[in-house]
Amino acid sequence: MFSRAIKVAIALIAPARQVKTRAMDQPPNPDFLDDITGALDWWRTAGVDCDFLDEPVEWLAAPEGEEPAPVERRRPPPRPDPEAPPPVARLDPGSLPQGLEAFASWWMTEPLLCEGGPAARVPPQGRPGADLMVVVEEPEAQDIDTLLSGSHGKLLDAILSAFGTDRHNVYLASALPRHTPGADWEAMNERGLGQVLAHHIGLVAPKRLFVLGGNVLPLIGHESPHRPAMLRTFNHVDRQIPLLASWALPALLTQPRAKPVLWRAWLEWTAG
């Protein structure tokens, strides 16, 4: 707008003065310059002290005929959030023991398996190559040396008796090494607990796998059971193990109608 004001001032003053120049080096008329200065001072007094254009102008535009150089825009690295939780420490699959006896010792001492150190951990029990491996979610609160020594264990003993066996002829293990109320199963899986359980099953090499608890199945690649019992197959390396899945023992204790469903699933499972 300021340059437009100069043009307007020249347009208004020039006809009155009838200024005509014959050459570029002809000295300007002092009165003419005074008139222009006065016009500009008038605009400044009115508050117009900048030059405005109706159309935007690219000051950094490349010369005509040249392509503009690409502008590399770098975002600053994100600042760490002081309130963010620390990254989950993962178990190294290569560090898992390769023998069942060594695994049992490692199960009782490995700090990454659960919070709280090795206290109150309960070992698995049984022999490798068992006809049936039973996996529950966790030990009972009162367990010390023996897995499932309370009411959950009594229910399991009754189930195994109906199946025609007992806990001395099966391999009994838990997905967690200690009783953990409100366990974060998703975080446990991220930590690598599913790989540990699959490795454990591989070391035992049972003929059949009986899983009790909906939190166990996602660890080994299956959905939680929506029915009291369902048949699945556990794939491990180069072999497949028939799998019977059911609700956790606490749920079976409070749902008597689930027991006949589990019994029929067992008969179907073992009929072949």
Image: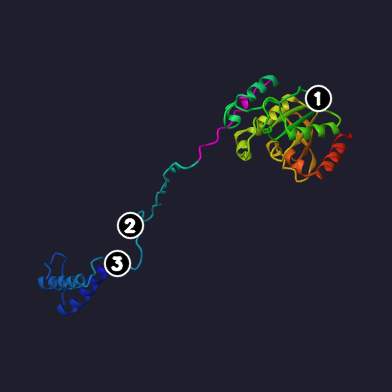
Q: Residue at x 63, y 35 (%)?
A: 180
Label 1, label 3: how far apart the Cα atoms are: 93 Å
Quarter of the image that includes the N terminus? bottom left
Relative to residue 191, is residue 151 drawn left or right? right
Q: Amino acid at mark 3?
A: Phe
Q: Residue at x 70, y 31 (%)?
A: 174
> Which circle's residue, 3 or 2, is located before the other in the chain?
3
Q: Residue at the bottom extreme?
A: 16
Magenta span: predominant SS is loop
Label 2, label 1: how far apart the Cα atoms are: 86 Å
Occupied quadrant, residue 237 = top right
> Which circle's residue, 2 or 1, is located before the other in the chain?
2
Q: Residue at x 16, y 67 (%)?
A: 23
Label 2 sits on residue? 59
Q: Amino acid at mark 1?
A: Asn
Label 1 sits on residue? 169
x and y, in percent, of residue 91 in the image: 59, 30
Residue 94 on the magenta span: yes
x and y, in percent, of residue 209 in the image: 78, 32
* 3 or 2: mark nearer the eye: 3
Residue in front for this viewpoint, 79 or 1: 79
Q: Secondary structure at mark 2?
A: loop
Circle 3 crowding by C-alpha within 10 Å: few under 14, some 14–19, many from 20: few
> Which circle's residue, 1 or 3, is located before the other in the chain?
3
Q: Residue at the right extreme?
A: 271
The magenta stretch is: 85-99
Label 3 sits on residue? 52
Circle 1 crowding by C-alpha within 10 Å: few under 14, some 14–19, many from 20: some
Q: Amino acid at mark 2?
A: Trp
x and y, in percent, of residue 144 in the image: 67, 27
